[in-house]
Amino acid sequence: MSVVLVAEDEPRIASFVAKGLRSAGFTPLVCGDGATALDHALTGDVALVVLDIGLPVLDGFEVLRRLRERGSTVPVVVLTARGSVDDTVAGLEGGADDYMAKPFRFEELLARIRLRLRESRPESGATSLRAGDVELDLRTRRLSVAGEGRDLSAREFGLAETFLRHPGQVLTREQLLSRVWGYDFDPGSNVVDVYVGYLRRKLGPGRLATVRGMGYRLDPQG
């Protein structure tokens, strides 16, 4: 599931956009200031940024400038109350891929997000993810381990996709919860551990390691 960063300091708008993205199959990641947005956008884990201009700490224009200066090509859709021609030109010339003025219709925003994601993925013809002898078919949502097929639930598929996009990398419970379930981390919840257990049984022994005090790591074999 693609992670869409929503950089918006108005909670009502941020919640509205996040809810719509979640319903459309994306994983929203919400932040309310420009400095945090920049940090998230530079990780490489974000597929697209929906960026407000009037952010605290760093405004959207500064976030955009720093992103492009550091070589990031992540698609950015600016969503702002500043709808003047000058602001639109400044946003597009500053490296934004699209520019929408508030108020807006979510259906149009979603269409623009999908378009920009398609444009940014010339390699998107790939229909599977592979790491070692583990392969995930993105069309059928079936897992293959050493050539043997395994069926996955929706949450198991989301976890498997996340691990296969980051093989060998330690992923924290907070990261997994945000990307697969799409809501803020509750330190009292064990839902991640439960589903990691389900997925571990389907992957087989030795492939999904627990890193004590940190999270989980996919160690593919083969």
Image (cartoon, rainbow, N blue to C red):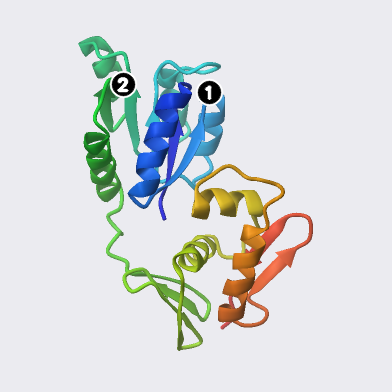
- Left/right of residue 93 with respect to residue 52 in the rendered view: left
Residue in view at x 55 percent, y 25 percent: 35
Identified by mark 1, the residue type is Asp
Q: What x and y, as percent, mark residue 219?
A: 63, 72
Q: Nearer the viewer, mark 2 or mark 1?
A: 1
The residues bearing labels 2 and 1 have C-alpha atoms spaced at a distance of 18 Å
Residue identified by numbered label 1: 33
Which of marks 1 and 2 precedes in the sequence? 1
- Left/right of residue 45 with respect to residue 208 in the rendered view: left
- Left/right of residue 110 with respect to residue 217 in the rendered view: left
* Near-viewer residue (163 or 97): 163
The dot on residue 91 is 2
Image height of 173 relative to 14, above or below: below
Identified by mark 2, the residue type is Gly
Question: Are the residues tagged 2 and 1 within 8 Å (C-beta)?
Answer: no
Which of the 4 image quadrants contains residue 104? top left
Disc 1 element: loop
Which of the 4 image quadrants contains residue 123? bottom left
Which quadrant is the N terminus positioned in?
Answer: bottom left
Image height of 192 relative to 137, above or below: above
Query: Can residue 94 be seen in this snapshot?
Result: no
Q: What x and y, as percent, mark residue 20?
A: 35, 41
